[in-house]
Amino acid sequence: MISKLPRWVWAGAWALAFVGGFVNVVGLLGFEHQAVTHLTGTTSMLAAALASLDGAAALHFAAIIGSFVAGTVLSGFLIQDSTLQLGRRYGVALLLESILLCVAVPLLKCNNIFGIYFASCACGLQNAMVSTDSGAVIRTTHLSGMFTDLGIFLGHSLRGLPVDMRRLRLCFLIITGFLCGGIAGAVAFHRLIYSALFIPAALTAITSLAYGIYHLRNRRRK
C-alpha cells in the first residue's frame, strides 16, 4: 500500500508523463520512426539486427540503448538516491533534460541520427530521476507497468480483494499525462516538425523552476 504522496509528486508525475508522451510521439513520427522513451522495442530491434548480422543497424540500436542508460547514470550521479525526497537536485536534472532536448532539435532537423541519441538520453535521465516514493514505483516515460497494475487491480476487485486506491489514481494520472502528451506531440509535430521538441524542453525548464520555488518556500516555512 502507498502512503500519502505529496502534492508536488502528483503534479510532477503528470507533467513529466506529458513530456514523455510528447517526446516519444515526435520520435515515432520523425525520420527514423524511433521510440525513444523506453527500450523494450529497441532491444528487440537490436536482437533482430544481430540475428541478421546487420552491423550498422545493431550499432544504431545499441547506441540508443546506451544513450538512455547514460541518462540514467547521469541521474544517479546527480540525485544519488532512488527515493523521491524534496530537496534533492531534481531541478538540476530537469534543466539538463531541457538542454538535451534543445540540442536534439537542430540535429534532427538535419536528419542527424545523434538527435535521437540526445533525446533518448534526456528520457533516460527523466525516467531514473522519478523513481520511487512511499512504496510507489513511478515511471513517466513508459506505461507497461501502469497498465499492468490496472489489470491487477481489476482482478483484485473482481475477487473482492482490497485495492490500493492511491496507486490506482497514480496509474491513471501517469497514463492520462502520457496520452495527452502524445496527442499534443502529434499535433505539434505536424505543424512544427522537430521544433516541437522545444515545447517539452520548455516544460521541463518551467518544472525545474517551479520545483526550485516550491522547495525554497517549503524551507522558509520550516
Image: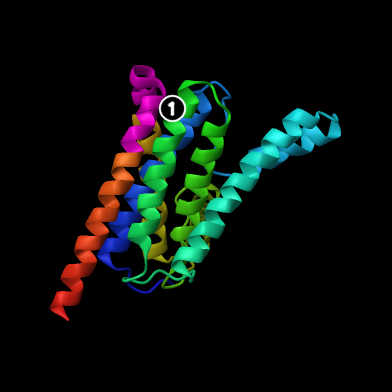
Q: In which quarter of the image is residue 100?
A: top left
Direction from residue 143 to residue 3 in the image, left or right:
left
Q: Residue sitting at 42 percent across and 39 percent down? A: 101
Give the farthest residue toward the top. 191
Instruction: Please state which of residues 6 and 80 is positioned toward the viewer in this rendering.
Output: 80
- Residue that badge 1 annotates: 106
User: Compared to 130, does 217 lie above or below?
Assistant: below
Direction from residue 11 to residue 213 in the image, left or right:
left
Q: In which quarter of the image is the C terminus?
A: bottom left
Residue 159 lies, in percent from the top left, at 53, 62
Q: Quadrant of residue 54?
A: top right
Q: Quadrant of residue 179?
A: top left
Residue 112 lies, in percent from the top left, at 55, 25
Q: Quadrant of the N terminus?
A: bottom left
Instruction: Please state which of residues 61 and 21 is positioned toward the viewer in this rendering.
Output: 61
Provide the secondary structure element on which disc 1 rests: helix
Callout 1 environment at 10 Å: few (<14), some (14 to 19), or many (20+)? some
Q: Tell me, yes or no, whether the highlighted magenta stretch contains residue 59.
A: no
Q: Residue sitting at 49 percent across and 28 percent down? A: 107
User: Compared to 18, does 128 lie above or below?
Assistant: below
Query: Which residues are the magenta region?
Result: 185-200
Q: Tell me, yes or no, whether the highlighted magenta stretch contains residue 192.
A: yes
Residue 43 lies, in percent from the top left, at 69, 42
Instruction: Please state which of residues 9 and 212 is positioned toward the viewer in this rendering.
Output: 212
Give the farthest residue toward the bottom. 222
Q: What residue type is disc 1 on?
A: Pro
Q: Residue sitting at 46 percent across and 22 percent down? A: 109
User: Compared to 162, does 72 lie above or below?
Assistant: above
Q: Is the magenta stretch mostly helix, strand or loop?
A: helix
Describe the colour scheme in one phrase: rainbow
Direction from residue 184 to residue 41 in the image, left or right:
right
Give the farthest residue toward the left. 221
